[in-house]
Image (cartoon, rainbow, N blue to C red):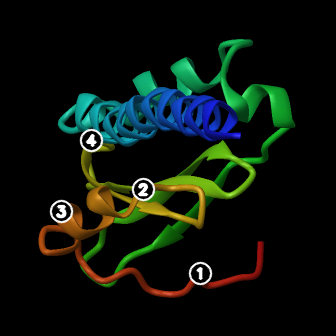
Amino acid sequence: MKIRLILSAAKWCILLLLLFPTGCAHKLSVESLSNEWIARPLADLKQHMQSPDSYAAKSGWQEKTYPLANGYYVYVEPLSPDCSIHWSVNQRDIIVDYRAIGNGCQRAADEASEDNMQKITKPATNW
């Protein structure tokens, strides 16, 4: 009986060790993905999103944008069914900030970007 408990506990420890780094890696990938596109032209991101490996291409996603009060606009990029990146884009079509939105997104990126990004207004029309 004690041997089974020890083996069971060991299996749980191994499982937790395997899951923990995966969770951290996911959080870093969303942040690094987003930071990689800051100060780059939106056209570059759109081209990247057309690659067959992107979730946007696989899901048949339709382009979505909405205006901000400061004259910028937001371009929405889906990362998964429950996570999207809302890119703040200036008048020169340069990405200046982002916000990760959805239950599948990690929250550190939202909080880090919240101070920098202008408050998002609701879309003028329904998507």
Residue 115 left/right relative to 92 = left
Q: Quadrant of the N terminus?
A: top right
Does 26 sit left or right of 90 as displayed?
right
Q: Quadrant of residue 9?
A: top right
Circle nearer the N terminus (4, 1): 4
- Label 3 or label 4, whichever lies nearer to me, is 3
Q: Earlier in the sequence, mark 2 or mark 1?
A: 2
Give the class, few, some or many, for how many residues have Cα within 10 Å of label 2's Cα (few <14, many ≥20): many
The numbered disc on residue 112 is: 3
Q: CA gap, disc 4 to disc 1? A: 20 Å
Q: Which label belongs to residue 94?
A: 4
Q: Mark 1, mark 3: which one is toward the viewer?
A: 3
- Res. 123 mark: 1
Q: Earlier in the sequence, mark 2 or mark 4?
A: 4
Amino acid found under the numbered disc labelled 3: Ala
Alpha-carbon distance for marks 1 and 3?
23 Å
Name the amino acid type tagged 4: Ile
**Which quadrant would residue 73 be assigned to in this image?**
bottom left
Instruction: Give me the disc on residue 90.
Output: none
Q: Are marks 2 and 1 in contact (CB under 8 Å)?
A: no
Q: Earlier in the sequence, mark 2 or mark 3?
A: 2
Q: Quarter of the image holding residue 124?
A: bottom right
Q: Residue at x 13, y 74 (%)?
A: 115
Which residue is depicted at the point 42% across and 22% down?
44
Q: Position of residue 51 (x, y in %)?
A: 66, 13
Disc nearer the start of the sequence (3/4): 4
- For marks 2 and 3, give the CA distance: 11 Å
Q: Nearer the viewer, mark 2 or mark 3?
A: 2
In the picture of the structure, the residue carrying the numbered disc 2 is 106
Depth check: 65 or 11 in front?
11
Looking at the rendered structure, the secondary structure element under dot 3 is: helix
